[in-house]
Image: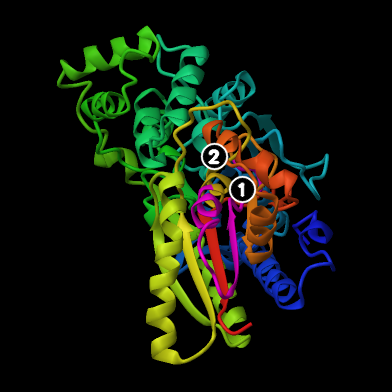
């Protein structure tokens, strides 16, 4: 079981029908997490059969390679590496070695001291010196490869922070400051990663360029997506994907969020110099760099949605996957969620006559940080939802779970939270004051107080966030 505070979330002192909804929702969450375990995604996508490395329908003859180098980074990369090593151990005809940058909050299970793939602990979401040292060491490994080598690059969300390599004249502190400003600004992950690409000598296709310049080795990138739309150029800032953005795009993003005078001088100089230099300001899309690069998306939140949909249909729920692109300000989405649910009830129930409804959404909301509280995007969204509906009349049982499946949301230790009619009744009865929690972005303190936060710890999983809404219209 992933959820560690299950007894807190399903107490015996709440009404039976609400308890039943909580059990179904939390079971669905466990199914969602299990379906996107990185090790399972690797095992489903990658095989070695008769000297052939098979990825989906593509085959690579391992007899043609001298050595395999396994490198990468991201929240899911530890489990990915364990699965790859398990595979390579069964094929002793070729030597391999490797290095992966993983979050320092992650507890690694089943990692042997004799492993040839080293795990380097680094910081997320703000890069640190350990991440920089690991990334530099990966580049040294690449410099020692030949055209007859195979590089297996394991990549997932979180790789942008875990694989730092700032451009010349930009130091690590400048990179940390810029990252912090962007995260607090409310910018989308796509916008943040555009900026990260241009401040880095690793991201935005520059990893592929490094391999091309060093040895022209073959690169296989195995990718697990945590971004809306599964755009490969945005996942971990696309180290092996051509970058079509420019320094002009960075200028526009910083201007949009009023950060142009807040970022460090070194970042401002890079942008100003680059925008006036046609060579520096052109996209990095040189075809030769990517000729021997093979990118494979092996997992996303879609797997979770498919499995929990099947589970809920067996329980006679109408299931509606209403969006795979939930984006925007968490507070605004939370305020609008009640009206959205009301419209969905009217539409779906009239058509099917069923009384149990499941609404599923995936994506990634943002929070513009104004206070110094503890929280995360899903908790912020649910706090605003409760504040909006505390004066509404709701004559049905409902359960809403909003979670970041990697297990750690924002600056809290929760993956998200659970709200339902039981919690709403409690809030109304106690005349709970929301004002200080809302003003201070202190959503986790609110849900901790009400025993409604969901605790898993770092899961080693990294896909889009999950929003699950269960409605029992005939309690």
Q: In front here: 58 or 193? A: 193
Find disc 1 in the rendering and name its residue: 76
Q: Position of residue 106 (x, y in %)?
A: 72, 40
Q: Are marks 2 and 1 in contact (CB under 8 Å)?
A: yes
- The secondary structure type at the circle numbered 2 is loop
Q: In front here: 409 or 87? A: 409
Q: Residue at x 50, y 62 (%)?
A: 392
N-terminal of the pair, mark 2 or mark 1, is: 1
Q: Is residue 393 magenta?
A: yes
Answer above or below: position of 391 versus 119. below
Find disc 2 in the rendering and name its residue: 158
Q: Residue 445 appears in which quarter of the rendering? A: top right
Q: Position of residue 143 (x, y in %)?
A: 50, 27
Q: In front here: 10 or 247? A: 10
Position of 42 with respect to 20 (left or right) is left
Q: How many marks?
A: 2
Q: Is residue 352 magenta?
A: no
Q: Which residues are magenta?
A: 384-409
Q: Give the color scheme: rainbow, by chain, secondary structure or one colour.
A: rainbow
Answer above or below: position of 349 versus 72. below
Q: Residues within 10 Å of mark 2 (few under 14, many from 20)?
A: many
Q: Residue at x 36, y 51 (%)?
A: 231
């Amino acid at each position: 079981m992933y959820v560690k505070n299950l007894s807190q979330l399903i107490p015996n002192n709440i009404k039976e029908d609400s308890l039943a909804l909580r059990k179904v929702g939390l079971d669905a969450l466990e199914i969602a997490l299990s379906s996107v375990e990185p090790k399972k995604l690797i095992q489903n996508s990658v095989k070695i059969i008769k000297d052939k490395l098979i990825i989906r329908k593509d085959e690579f003859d391992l007899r043609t390679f001298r050595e395999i180098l396994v490198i990468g980074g991201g929240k899911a990369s530890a489990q990915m590496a364990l699965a790859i090593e398990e595979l390579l151990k069964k094929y002793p005809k070729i030597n391999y070695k490797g290095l992966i940058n993983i979050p320092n909050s992650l507890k690694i299970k089943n990692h042997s001291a004799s492993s040839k793939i080293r795990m380097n602990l680094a910081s997320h979401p703000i890069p640190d010196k350990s991440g920089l040292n690991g990334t530099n060491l990966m580049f040294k490994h690449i410099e020692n490869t030949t055209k007859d080598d195979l590089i297996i690059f394991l990549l997932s969300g979180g790789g942008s922070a875990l694989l730092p390599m700032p451009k010349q004249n930009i130091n690590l502190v400048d990179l940390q400051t810029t990252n912090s400003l962007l995260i607090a600004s409310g910018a989308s992950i796509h916008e943040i990663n555009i900026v990260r690409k241009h401040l880095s000598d690793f991201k935005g296709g520059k990893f592929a360029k490094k391999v091309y310049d060093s040895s022209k080795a073959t690169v296989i990138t195995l990718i697990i997506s945590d971004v809306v739309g599964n755009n490969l150029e945005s996942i971990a800032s696309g180290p092996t994907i051509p970058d079509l953005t420019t320094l002009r795009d960075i200028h526009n993003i910083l201007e949009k969020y009023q950060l142009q005078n807040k970022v460090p001088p070194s970042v401002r100089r890079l942008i100003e110099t680059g925008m006036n230099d046609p060579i520096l300001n052109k996209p990095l899309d040189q075809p030769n760099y990517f000729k021997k690069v093979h990118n494979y998306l092996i997992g996303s939140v879609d797997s979770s949605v498919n499995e929990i949909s099947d589970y809920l249909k067996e329980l006679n729920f109408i299931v509606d996957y209403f969006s795979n692109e939930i984006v925007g300000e968490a507070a605004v989405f939370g305020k609008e969620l009640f009206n959205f649910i009301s419209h969905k009830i009217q539409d779906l129930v009239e058509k099917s006559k069923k009384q149990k409804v499941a609404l599923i959404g995936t994506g990634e909301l943002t929070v513009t940080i104004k206070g110094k509280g503890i929280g995360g995007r899903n908790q912020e969204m649910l706090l605003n939802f409760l504040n909006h509906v505390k004066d509404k009349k709701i004559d049905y049982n409902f359960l809403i779970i909003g979670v970041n499946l990697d297990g750690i949301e924002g600056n809290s230790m929760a993956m998200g939270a659970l709200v339902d009619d039981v919690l709403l009744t409690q809030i109304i009865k106690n005349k709970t004051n929301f004002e200080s929690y809302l003003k201070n972005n202190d959503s986790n303190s609110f849900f901790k107080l009400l025993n409604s936060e969901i605790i898993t710890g770092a899961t080693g999983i990294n896909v889009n966030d999950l929003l699950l809404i269960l409605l029992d219209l005939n309690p």
